[in-house]
Image (cartoon, rainbow, N blue to C red):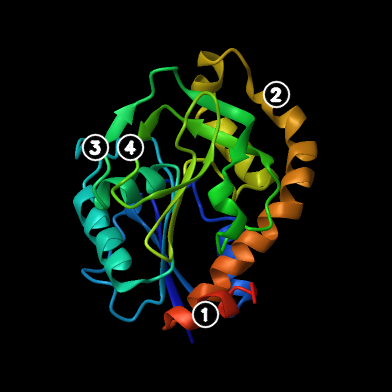
Amino acid sequence: MSSCLVVQHLEPESSYAIGEALATAGIEVDQRRTDVAKPLPETLDGFDGLVVMGGPMSADSDAGFPTRRQELALLAEAVDLGLPTLGVCLGAQLLAAATGGRILRGMSGPEIGWAPVRLQATAADDPLLASVPGELSVLHWHGDTFELPPGGVLLASNDQYVHQAFRIGPRAWGFQFHLEVDEVAVAAFAGSFGADLAAVGTSPGDLMDSTPAELARLEVHRRPVLDRFAALVGARPLGVDDFDLAVGLT
């Protein structure tokens, strides 16, 4: 059975739909909670994929983030090995940093709540995002951003934060936004990080009022993205010629 390591930093920031897609594909999900000191593996030996979730820590500092360097090493190893890899929010920033990008404080202030991203032309033949329309409304919850690492391919952007999604190498993706959330997840975010909402002039109630309709629109497009990622994990190891076949693009 294929196995995927999922790194979770806080209780609200679980893998949600990502973990569900992996489990549905028959992949063993090994989810490690770093906030309860569940140790991370030293290497990715025995794993067929890697997912790193979000959190309020800085991807550029060890302060309050004792596993940061180990996560950077695991992400760099995953890219070097060609393992299917997905970084979400903080995880996307860590993926960028692990492969040579710089972490930056967002100059336009925090981006929190439902807002669109625009898919770039490069997404049209991306193995995960090829089926996504030109614009997609997603949940944002971040104040930091990153430079693309050398060789990184920008896949999605918006006016507030240019770097919203990227690919590095053939099988590693960073999503600055939260594609994985369901209504339980959004409620957990609102309950745990409600002060962030006040800082951008909204409230948990406003966020939850808009969430059912937003999730209904999102689900149509995020399901094939996450199913394709799960298919890649389940198909490991792959040769280059097998890549499109594994995600159903041929």
Q: Is residue 9 left or right of residue 25?
A: left
**Residue receiving disc 3:** 60
Label 2 crowd bin: few (<14), some (14–19), many (20+), radius 10 Å: few
Q: Is residue 55 left or right of residue 164?
A: left
Which numbered disc covers residue 147?
Answer: 4
User: Mark 2 and mark 4: span between their CA atoms?
Assistant: 34 Å
User: Mark 2 and mark 1: span between their CA atoms?
Assistant: 39 Å
Q: Secondary structure at mark 4?
A: loop
User: Mark 1 and mark 3: span between their CA atoms?
Assistant: 32 Å
Q: Residue at x 59, y 12 (%)?
A: 201
Please tell me in which quadrant of the rendered image residue 118 appears: top right
Q: Position of residue 183 (x, y in %)?
A: 69, 44
User: Mark 1 and mark 4: span between their CA atoms?
Assistant: 30 Å
Q: Is residue 73 left or right of residue 10?
A: left
Q: Nearer the viewer, residue 97 or 215?
A: 97
**Residue receiving disc 1:** 234
Q: Secondary structure at mark 1?
A: helix
**Residue receiving disc 2:** 205
> Which mark is in front, 2 or 1?
1
Q: Position of residue 30 (x, y in %)?
A: 43, 70
> Which mark is in front, 2 or 4?
4
Please tell me in which quadrant of the rendered image residue 231 appears: bottom right
**In the rendered image, the vertical position of residue 56 relative to residue 179, given as above or below:** above
